Image (spheres, rainbow, N blue to C red):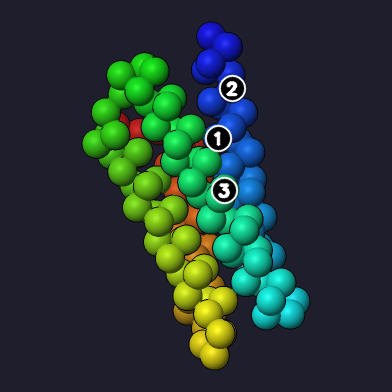
Amino acid sequence: MALWLVLRLAKLIGVIAFAMGIALALGQGPQQVRQRAAYWLATPGFIVTWIAGWGMARMYAISLGRPWITISMVASLIALHEIIREVEPGRPRSKVRVAVILIALLVALASMVIRHG
């Protein structure tokens, strides 16, 4: 039971770091600050979220092929990919990319909360 709580806490911290990194990277700050947020906050948050989620699924023998897990993984990967592209030097800011990032983040979070299928 203690491991379950540690994994849940790690996943919560990872999700918060991922979302905060995305929020800061999409902000109006200097390019270097936005890049640091994407590389040093969103990316580690993404990794911690995936590792803790894998541990939770493994603990209860839940297949990673379940639709809600697959949807969450793909959506979070899309959000990470696009936030990294958004902060690349010389790349113009794109409202479409921002929409894709926010929608992907929302889908990933909703899928983790709803847990359908």
Q: Note whether 15 is above or below 94 in the view shown.
A: above
Left or right, 35 with respect to 85, comes to right
Query: Counting other residues with Cα less than 10 Å from the Cα at mark 1, is it few (<14), some (14-19), or many (20 or more)?
Result: many
Q: Secondary structure at mark 3?
A: helix
Q: Nearer the viewer, residue 69 or 114?
A: 69
Left or right, 69 with respect to 2, comes to left
Indicate the quadrant where residue 14 lies. top right
Residue 99 visible in the displayed image: no
In the rendered structure, which disc, 2 or 3, sits on the residue that comes first in sequence?
2
Outermost residue on the right side: it is: 29
Q: Which mark is residue 45?
A: 3
Name the amino acid, label 3.
Gly
Whole-number angstrom distance, CA of label 1 to CA of label 3: 9 Å
Q: Note whether 63 is above or below 27 in the view shown.
A: above
Q: Report the residue marked by disc 2.
A: 6
Q: Secondary structure at mark 1?
A: helix
Label 1 with label 3: CB-CB less than 8 Å: no
In the rendered structure, which disc, 2 or 1, sits on the residue that comes first in sequence?
2
Residue 83 place in picture, x, y as percent: 52, 68
Left or right, 116 with respect to 80, comes to left
Indicate the quadrant where residue 62 lies. top left
In the rendered structure, which disc, 1 or 3, sits on the residue that comes first in sequence?
1
Query: Counting other residues with Cα less than 10 Å from the Cα at mark 2, is it few (<14), some (14-19), or many (20 or more)?
Result: few
Q: Which mark is residue 11?
A: 1
Whole-number angstrom distance, CA of label 2 to CA of label 1: 9 Å
Residue 41 place in picture, x, y as percent: 63, 55
